[in-house]
Image (spheres, coloured by chain):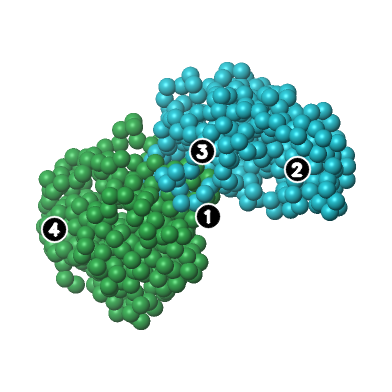
Chain colours: A green, B cyan
Amino acid sequence: MEVTNRYVVIKAHVDGPPKESHFEIKSEVISLELEAGSEDTIVKNLYVSIDPYQINRMKSYSSSQSSINLAAPVNPGEGIDTYGVAKVVASGNPEFQKDDLVAGLVSWGEYTVIKPGGLLKKLDPMGFPLSYHVGTLAFSGLTAYAGFFQVCKPKKGEKVFVSAASGSVGHLVGQYAKLLGCYVVGCAGTDEKVALLKEKLGFDHAFNYKEETDLKATLKSYFPEGIDIYFDNVGAEMQEAAVSNMSLFGRIAVCGVISEYTNTGRKASPDMIDVVYKRIKIQGFLASDFLNIFTEFLSTTCDHLLTGKMKPLEDISDGLESIPLAFVGLFYGQNIGKKIVKIADE
Amino acid sequence: MEVTNRYVVIKAHVDGPPKESHFEIKSEVISLELEAGSEDTIVKNLYVSIDPYQINRMKSYSSSQSSINLAAPVNPGEGIDTYGVAKVVASGNPEFQKDDLVAGLVSWGEYTVIKPGGLLKKLDPMGFPLSYHVGTLAFSGLTAYAGFFQVCKPKKGEKVFVSAASGSVGHLVGQYAKLLGCYVVGCAGTDEKVALLKEKLGFDHAFNYKEETDLKATLKSYFPEGIDIYFDNVGAEMQEAAVSNMSLFGRIAVCGVISEYTNTGRKASPDMIDVVYKRIKIQGFLASDFLNIFTEFLSTTCDHLLTGKMKPLEDISDGLESIPLAFVGLFYGQNIGKKIVKIADE
């Protein structure tokens, strides 16, 4: 049986803010049957993750780039891999059977052919919506959990600031922090998001950074005794303001730098004199370094979800063709919570 | 018996680069005898430490300053405390006897009256010159030792970059790193210093940063496989260049920010995308947090000195009146190694 597989590609490298016109949808005819002896797995994608970091893979890598190739590049015209949930159509890999639900590295497409050794595992939804397994119970959740607990090493009662606090990771960090007994303040870019953080997610305070003219003073007002932990999703001016308001031995987990991904704003210049005297630690991390605690993360988070102590925010668009706009929207703060595109029904 | 005590003060707060004219020498008549019942200790200062961080205490503290008072302010017209080695003239404190050698918090003056509870301890020179006990075997040494071993957590064979590498702390860091079996490159601001690092102190390479036009490319040439550890004494552009050249899981110990203390240069804007993807840790520290390892530091360092494996660099000026120029010179790179002023013979 043959089908038309539609998938999203970039037309050329994307070096500034992304636009829908940077993308196009390509089609190919693929067979849903495997050749004899193939160990491939063909999956039909159901839900795929839409993440800001993909922009770093779409850039042209010039000599001005860092010496280390930071992110596997996405080439124009080629499929773009992403985390997602899918259903097995055919498999030559003995691990998978037709109709198995799986989660792993699929693509911004309707179907993905996954080679043996690819990042794919059988998925037990455990009664949760499949979309939870794209973000909250997958890498967005692990990023929040590992970044907060392992990188920031929080203690009960500490004062925590989260930027992009209604984003895929931020809204989970704030909830983990509240459950630990921390004082939590988040910032976001619309009044609607701010209300959500305070009223639905239980943040102690939240503010709309776009309405503030003096971020240092704003943070000072929410943290008169200083910030113990800053979970940084944005970089730039907000990081500077946070450093200026950190307490002694404050910790900053640098999770993302969305304001700097598109080279549109200026970079953070945190005051290094503060860093020295206040013994501040600024640490970058990736969730993939913490796969060793995935089981702990999953079990803790499932408990919180089942007891209603954590509320995941999801922002789901419908259909493959909505991917470009969904992705572009991340850079304009259009998502609330984890951005996901639903490709097909189970 | 009464004597004239001369001491150095600032005339007013110093907010830009320091000049000799910011300072003056004041005199007072003091008694070298204690009143009955006094627990004070009067010491005659022999060697005093001259450190860049003092500039941060001399600034006017305005509302633009950080919420935490980072450094105990120095007030115009008042004596300036500093670490040093001294001899006891009279003591009502049973810990000290006349003629005891002591080390601790004295002042930029000929005599210091130290209250009970002040930071002062009896000094056993252990056969080393007294000046060693002002820097190499005191806070400069502990800063290098703790910053390198505790903050950077180095492993044999790692690649280490040290800025201000001929300075009071940097030249010791480089030698500790070489003794551990690291590859070590330092930068300094004159060809004379560069030669010293390579020929006398055993650095693998050293360069004069003032002769380089592209610091990122310079570091790339010395660290084609990346920097594992950057011991940062300067901040600014050099920190940016180092971040750009760090290896995965690289560590930056921020010890000092001399290029930013006087607000003359621009601040560091390390690339936070590098920080995330390379999981870089940037950590400020103060030696005073590591007093728990002072004994280990002292014993290790004494061994290295006795066996000739470490060579301290000292830059000693003579006489109280040389203090202002000695201090100002720190900000123009005029010192080679630990800057000390000898106030009097033992």
Q: Chain of mark 3?
A: B
**Callout 2 secondary element:** strand
Q: Is residue B83 above or below residue A83?
A: above
Mark 3 Cα-neighbour bin, 10 Å: few <14, some 14–19, many ≥20: many
Q: Earlier in the sequence, mark 2 or mark 3?
A: 3
Measured from the top left, where is residue A253 in percent x and y? 43, 54
Mark 4 Cα-neighbour bin, 10 Å: few <14, some 14–19, many ≥20: some
What amino acid type is highlighted by mark number 3? Lys
What amino acid type is highlighted by mark number 1? Phe
Mark 2 in CB contact with mark 3 (< 8 angstroms): no
Measured from the top left, where is residue B6 in percent x and y? 72, 30
Looking at the rendered structure, which numbered label has been put on residue A182? none
* Residue at image mark 3: B59
Q: Nearer the viewer, residue B22 or B331?
A: B22
Q: CA distance from mark 4 to mark 2?
A: 76 Å
Q: Chain of mark 1?
A: A
Q: Taking the image as drawn, is residue B187 in sight?
A: no
Q: Is residue B286 left or right of residue B227?
A: right
**Callout 1 secondary element:** strand
Q: CA distance from mark 1 to mark 3?
A: 23 Å
Give residue A107's quadrant in the image.
bottom left
* Residue at image mark 4: A322
Q: CA distance from mark 1 to mark 2?
A: 33 Å
What amino acid type is highlighted by mark number 2? Val
Looking at the rendered structure, which numbered label has been put on residue A249? 1
